[in-house]
Structures are given as structure tokens and as C-alpha cells.
């Protein structure tokens, strides 16, 4: 593969992986420790991810258990969870925090699927923007003694990559939607 095309494919790969990471934080009725990825607590003056100050486990399908390494962090972790948009109430027994995941309503599931599709469209737009940037760059190459045929080949390669990554995004959206709608 041409190195001029390679850098744009790398950007498309990053777009896809950041989209997948974003979807991992959406809860689908089952307990998934990744929903805590964006949450931080103040640990000696530094905002620190919960996973770095506590042991996070999934003892049951609908429960996450958070066991802080220092008992002084329990209140801070609880506060971070309550302040987040997770919509979960932490249960605290003084040593461990338990997050119980309620069954999602049909309406909520449909809303989550809509959100996933919307995020998928955003990722596709990002991929298309990368294609546009690549095509603009390749058009400028004609002025720098690169043949029009070579530029056309580069544009074709970028179009194939764009199609490939858009299909991958569709597959990821489809799988996440099935996961959310599965009761």
C-alpha cells in the first residue's frame, strides 16, 4: 500500500477504534465494567480513573462490585457515580460499593439503539471527512509532477478503504443494537 494512503487508513482505524470504545461505555442491561472508564475520583489531588484506585469485578450478570484499596475513597467513588450520567444508585456497605443494573425498559432499549445509530453516523461522517482530506491532498499532487492516472489510483484506493471502514462501522452498530435489544 502506498504510504500516502497508509496515513489516511491509520486515521480511519483510529476513528473506528474510538467509536468502538465509545460504544463499550453504553450499558446494555448487563453489567459491564467499561461503563466506569470515563469516571475519575480525586486521589491525592489528581483525577484518577476508578479502575486505578479500586478492584472492579462483576460477581453477577447485573452487578458491578467496586472495592477501593483505601476506605477513604468510598465516598468519593460514590459521589463520582452519582454525578455521572450512568443513572445508577451505588449501594455502599462501608467496604464495597455495589452497582445493581435494573432491567432496561423497552422504551429505554429503543432509545439506546437510536443513540448507537446516531454515534455510528457520526463515525461514518468522520471516515468520509478523512476521505475528503485525502482526495484534496491527492489533487494537489497533480501540480507536483504526479500523473493524473496515479492520482486517480490513489483516490480509488481511498474510496475502497472508506467503503471497508463504513461497512465495519455498520457491523459494529448492528452488533451493539442486537446486544441492547436482547432481553
Image (cartoon, helix red, strand yellow):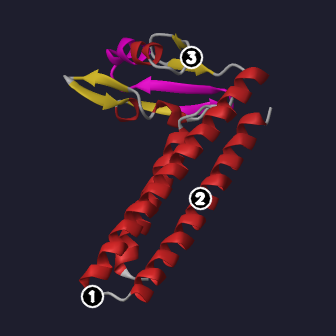
Q: Secondary structure at mark 3?
A: loop
Which mark's residue is nearer the viewer, 2 or 3?
2
Q: Is residue 45 left or right of residue 96?
A: left
Magenta part of the protein: which range?
57-78
Q: Which mark is residue 62?
A: none
Which quadrant is the C terminus positioned in?
top right
Q: Quadrant of residue 117?
A: top right
Q: Secondary structure at mark 2?
A: helix
Q: Is residue 180 left or right of residue 13?
A: right
Q: Position of residue 11 (x, y in %)?
A: 40, 61
- Residue at point 69% right, 32% down? 61
Marks 2 and 3, Cα distance to the nearest angstrom?
33 Å
The residue carrying mark 3 is: 88
- Residue at point 79% right, 36% down? 182
Of residues 110 and 180, the one nearer the viewer is: 110
The residue carrying mark 1 is: 145
Task: Judge whether 94 appears above or below 158 on screen.
Answer: above
Amino acid at each position: 500500500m502506498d504510504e500516502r494512503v497508509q496515513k489516511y487508513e491509520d486515521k480511519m482505524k483510529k476513528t473506528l477504534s474510538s467509536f468502538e470504545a465509545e460504544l463499550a461505555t453504553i450499558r446494555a442491561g448487563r453489567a459491564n465494567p467499561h461503563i466506569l472508564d470515563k469516571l475519575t475520583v480525586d486521589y491525592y489531588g489528581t483525577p484518577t480513573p476508578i479502575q486505578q484506585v479500586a478492584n472492579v469485578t462483576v460477581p453477577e450478570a447485573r452487578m458491578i462490585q467496586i472495592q477501593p484499596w483505601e476506605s477513604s475513597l468510598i465516598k468519593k467513588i460514590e459521589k463520582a457515580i452519582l454525578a455521572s450520567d450512568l443513572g445508577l444508585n451505588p449501594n455502599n456497605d462501608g467496604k464495597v460499593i455495589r452497582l445493581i443494573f435494573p432491567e432496561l425498559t423497552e422504551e429505554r432499549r429503543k432509545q439506546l439503539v437510536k443513540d448507537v445509530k446516531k454515534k455510528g453516523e457520526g463515525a461514518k461522517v468522520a471516515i468520509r471527512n478523512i476521505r475528503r482530506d485525502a482526495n484534496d491532498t491527492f489533487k494537489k499532487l497533480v501540480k507536483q509532477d504526479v500523473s493524473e492516472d496515479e492520482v486517480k489510483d490513489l483516490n480509488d484506493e481511498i474510496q475502497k478503504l472508506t467503503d471497508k471502514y463504513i461497512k465495519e462501522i455498520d457491523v459494529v452498530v448492528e452488533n451493539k443494537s442486537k446486544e441492547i435489544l436482547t432481553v
